[in-house]
Image (tube, rainbow, N blue to C red):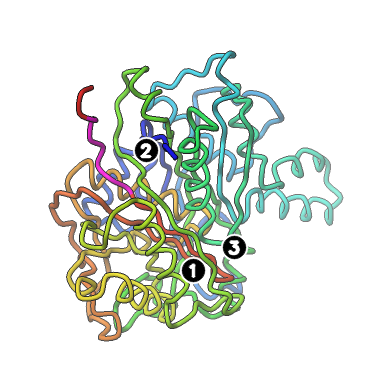
């Protein structure tokens, strides 16, 4: 069965180390630490006081179209990244082809903040309650995006813990590859909330040192982050017809479930290894063809060791030498948005010729034994790479991305 090739023609991102792709790439290259004390809400009772929070006002000069105002923070993050990605791609969606374009987005919390504000105002018997619940559903941000760009090809939301946006990208990729869509807008978004902060604190996997140190022997947990990332995917035929630029090509994906525990990963790494090996097989490559792995790398003991075990299962002897870094060390764990943000990080690294570092690294964990690109970005020529996303409940997704090569004879 013939399958369409799928290229990435537009990128957009908002994060603690950059509010657009250019700033984000610079932050990655510099190894910028985007973790700071939380200012958006009270941190009383929380285990950690720091996160990858986006500081300052989130402003947009483009009017918010449709629905109501004001916009929930999570929805606004998504819209900012979405607008940048669409502008970057030069994509113009006409009425005739709007059914051939859809939106797949991943998120864990969606409009958590609107829901919390609703409860607060309800308790205080304040007015203005109704609109707050309109941004609470997980689909609200994507619905705003579809309205703004007049997209009629469907809205789909994936909420599969920390693998949410990676799976959303995989599903959008599959829709184009199978010929069911000409273009897809994919990604993920997440806003910080005290609910998530308290939840991870109760599980005692938040860092007390207020630093994320993936793969370091003395790491003490994760810190949350917020942000959004969006990619515009198009079939090769549509890309050639539009004569647009292409920054990368998606080659394949793998999805699996641990069926081990509701929060803890399977320490053997079997589930994650299944996603990795399936992704390589789907892409038609071997472990020897991969130049870099963007790790899930949360900075917790169990997750880091599980991921390294999974990589050893698939990459064998190469596991100690293949570069594998964690960008969460710079921006925090953005939960449902993390897969998409890390996908953009890998693509800009491939485009700009560097490997993003794992910052705060001091002492290697002998149980990991990997090249985590410690502290400083590394110049590199990347042809193919893997981005890993693993979530609660043992949901795993690995994406394979390649440098785009123009087909012979075109």
Image position, residue 404 (x, y; %): 26, 37
As helix, strand or loop, the secondary structure at mark 3 comes to loop
Give the spatial CA distance, label 2 vs label 3: 27 Å
* Numbered disc in front, either 2 or 3: 2
Please give left or right for residue 106 compared with residue 385 in the image.
right
Q: Which residues are magenta?
A: 401-407
Q: Residue furthest bottom?
A: 366
Circle 2 packing at 10 Å, graded few (<14), some (14-19), many (20+), is some
- The residue labelled by disc 2 is 20
Image position, residue 1 (x, y; %): 44, 40
Q: Is residue 373 above or below residue 175?
A: below
Which residue: 21% across, 57% down?
291
Sequence-wise first label, 2 or 3? 2
Q: Nearer the viewer, residue 88 or 158?
A: 158
Magenta stretch containing residue 405, yes or no? Answer: yes
Give the spatial CA distance, label 3 vs label 1: 9 Å
As helix, strand or loop, the secondary structure at mark 2 comes to loop
Among the 4 quarters of the image, the one containing residue 201: bottom right
Which residue: 51% across, 65% down?
256
Sequence-wise first label, 3 or 1? 3
Q: Nearer the viewer, residue 84 or 207?
A: 84
- The residue labelled by disc 3 is 42
| Disc assigned to residue 49 | 1
The secondary structure that dominates the magenta segment is: loop
Give the spatial CA distance, label 2 vs label 1: 26 Å
Number of numbered callouts drawn: 3
């Amino acid at each position: 069965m013939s399958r369409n090739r799928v290229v990435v023609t537009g990128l957009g991102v908002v994060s603690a180390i950059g509010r657009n792709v250019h700033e984000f790439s610079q932050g990655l290259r510099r190894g910028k630490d985007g973790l700071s004390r939380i200012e958006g809400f009270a941190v009383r009772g929380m285990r950690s006081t720091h996160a990858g929070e986006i500081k300052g006002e989130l402003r947009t000069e483009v009017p918010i179209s449709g629905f109501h105002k004001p916009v929930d923070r999570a929805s606004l993050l998504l819209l900012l990244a979405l607008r940048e990605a669409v502008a970057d791609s030069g994509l113009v969606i006409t009425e005739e082809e709007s059914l051939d374009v859809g939106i797949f987005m991943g998120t864990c919390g969606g409009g958590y903040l609107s829901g919390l504000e609703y409860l607060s105002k309800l308790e205080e018997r304040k007015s203005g309650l109704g609109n707050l619940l309109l941004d609470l559903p997980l689909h609200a941000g994507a619905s705003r995006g579809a309205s703004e760009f007049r997209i009629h090809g469907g809205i789909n939301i994936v909420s599969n813990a920390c693998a949410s946006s990676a799976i959303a990208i995989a599903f959008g990729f599959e829709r184009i590859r199978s010929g069911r869509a000409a273009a897809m807008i994919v990604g993920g978004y997440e806003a910080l909330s005290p609910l998530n902060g308290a939840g991870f604190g109760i599980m005692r996997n938040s860092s007390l040192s207020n630093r994320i140190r993936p793969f370091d022997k003395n790491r003490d947990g994760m810190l949350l982050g917020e942000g959004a990332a969006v990619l515009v995917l198009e079939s090769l035929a549509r890309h050639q017809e539009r004569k647009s630029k292409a920054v990368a090509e998606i080659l394949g994906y793998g999805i699996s479930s641990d069926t081990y525990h509701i929060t803890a990963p399977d320490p053997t790494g079997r589930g994650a290894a299944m996603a990795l090996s399936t992704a390589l097989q789907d892409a038609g490559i071997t472990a020897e063809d991969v130049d870099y792995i963007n790790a899930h790398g949360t900075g917790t003991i169990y997750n880091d060791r599980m991921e390294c075990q999974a990589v050893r299962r698939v990459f064998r002897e190469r596991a100690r030498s293949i570069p594998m870094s964690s960008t969460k060390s710079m921006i925090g764990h953005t939960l449902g948005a993390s897969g998409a943000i890390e996908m953009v990080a890998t693509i800009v690294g491939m485009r700009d010729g560097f490997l993003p570092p794992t910052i705060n690294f001091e002492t290697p964990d002998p149980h990991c034994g990997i090249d985590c690109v410690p502290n400083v970005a590394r110049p590199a020529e990347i042809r193919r790479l893997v981005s890993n996303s693993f979530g609660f409940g043992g949901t795993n997704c690995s994406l394979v991305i390649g440098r785009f090569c123009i087909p012979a004879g075109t």
